[in-house]
Amino acid sequence: MIMSKTSTKELAVFGGPPLFDETLHVGRPNIGDRKKFLRRVNDMFDQRRLSNNGPFMRELEQKLATFLGVKHCISMCNATVALEITARALGLQGEVILPSFTFVASAHALQWQEITPVFCDVDPVTHNIDPGKIENLITPRTTGILGVHVWGRACDVEALSAIARKRHLRLMFDAAHAFACTHQGQMIGGFGDAEVFSFHATKFFNTFEGGAVTTNNDELAARLRGMRNFGFAGLDNVVDIGTNGKMSEVSAAMGLTSLESLDAFISVNYENYLTYCSGIEGIPGVKLIEFTGNEKNNYQYVVMEIDENKAGLSRDLLVKLLHAENILARRYFYPGCHQMEPYRSYFPNARLLLPETERLTANVLQLPTGTAVGKSEIDQICDLIRFIFFNGQEIKASIAQGNSFHD
Ligand code: T4K
């Protein structure tokens, strides 16, 4: 590792040694108390219960429901399957309105069931679906709205609920980013008909792979439980269409262990976020997204927005320069679901209705955080970013002259 760059020639993109020997990732998993986890795994082996409504899974569901202040928590093998099962359990069909500015799983979960995803533009400040643009997209085939709490910042739940009520639509939320986040002081989990969380390895709270659906609706909860287990209601009795969405015991054991370190994970993320904030402060055209002081957030994603006109350098060039230095910044959710297949072919003109989405997907990036990244590394990343922006013209000129080693 070298300490800092003093000349643009030292940038890795021009052949200098990378700032970090080992790659820094956005989604390095947080790992709780290994001993406790391994004790649970030993118990699991002793009991020979590896899946199918096991004791760890039930304990995790109960603890999550209590933590989220919601009546039912139904654990799942991942959030994508959880979204699929929830959409089906809610009877969604025809068309469902959702943002394009989301991970492609949100759209795929619908399309996988031949429900047409109808992409709505987002609010440029919150990055969430813009309720003011939904009503124009409603057709006689529309059956629901899928809001996504992007970066753990809640959608405009009240406006979406009002539209859903008025137009007799189902409302579900993709809360993949929003575990342990609040909206108006209430934990995300109890809004709409149901909410879906991801506990993937890259999420701050992980169960290796995993997810959960939460709802206050008893009937829906029973249907979700049945559907995640092939539609079984008893040993030989199948009463509904179903699939295999079950969370394994080893995942639930990881979840219980992660839960015990939840506060520590959040506090590391928060400290990292503050370090980034002060580190990049004052760079023209560059800012980190903000979080409302009175809402809880997990600070899982450090999201930077770049206004190229003011910053003098594009998001994509910055990402290229960072990657060369072994800083694997990401461009979630570039290029937007509407620009990914099969949606790009189905709706070739969708971008005309999605100007804010197009702008965001071009300007936003995420920086490494989590327990695998420390303050000194973040300080170095910020110094590098400052160096890059304050030498933007020289860097661009040098690349234009063909001096770049990385393409
Ligand atoms: N809805 C939304 C809004 C979502 O963001 C997601 C998932 C979903 C739904 C679906 O949830 P799940 O079905 O996954 O439960 C990653 C995650 O795989 C995905 O869960 C997440 N969102 C998405 C935003 O990011 P990739 O393809 O970018 O992941 P990948 O493999 O590039 O990993 C990210 C970084 O983390 C890499 O640099 C490597 C590092 N990493 C990753 C893993 C898995 C590690 O260091 N260790 C690891 O074990 O999608």
Image (cartoon, rainbow, N blue to C red):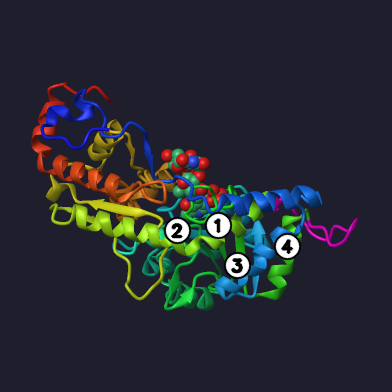
Looking at the image, do the residues carrying marks 2 and 4 touch, with CB atoms under 8 Å apart? no
Residue kind at label 2, given as amino acid type: Phe
Q: Which callout, 1 or 2, points at the residue further toward the start of the chain?
A: 1
- Mark identifier at residue 258: 1
Q: Position of residue 380 (x, y in %)?
A: 23, 43
Point 45% across, 61% down: residue: 264
The residue tagged 3 is 64
State which region is magenta: 231-249
Q: Nearer the viewer, residue 263 or 273?
A: 263
How far apart, in angstroms, are the residues tagged by discs 1 and 4?
23 Å
Which of disc 1 and disc 3 is earlier in sequence?
3
Of the numbered discs in the image, which one, if any, rests on residue 265?
Answer: 2
Q: Quadrant of residue 70?
A: bottom right
- Report how far apart the C-alphas of labels 3 and 1 lie in the structure: 12 Å
Judged from the image, the secondary structure of the residue bearing numbered disc 4 is: helix
Which structural element holds mark 1? helix
- CB within 8 Å, label 1 to label 2: yes
Q: On the rendered structure, is 239 left or right of 337?
A: right
Quarter occupied by the C terminus: top left
Residue at (21, 57) in percent of width and height = 278
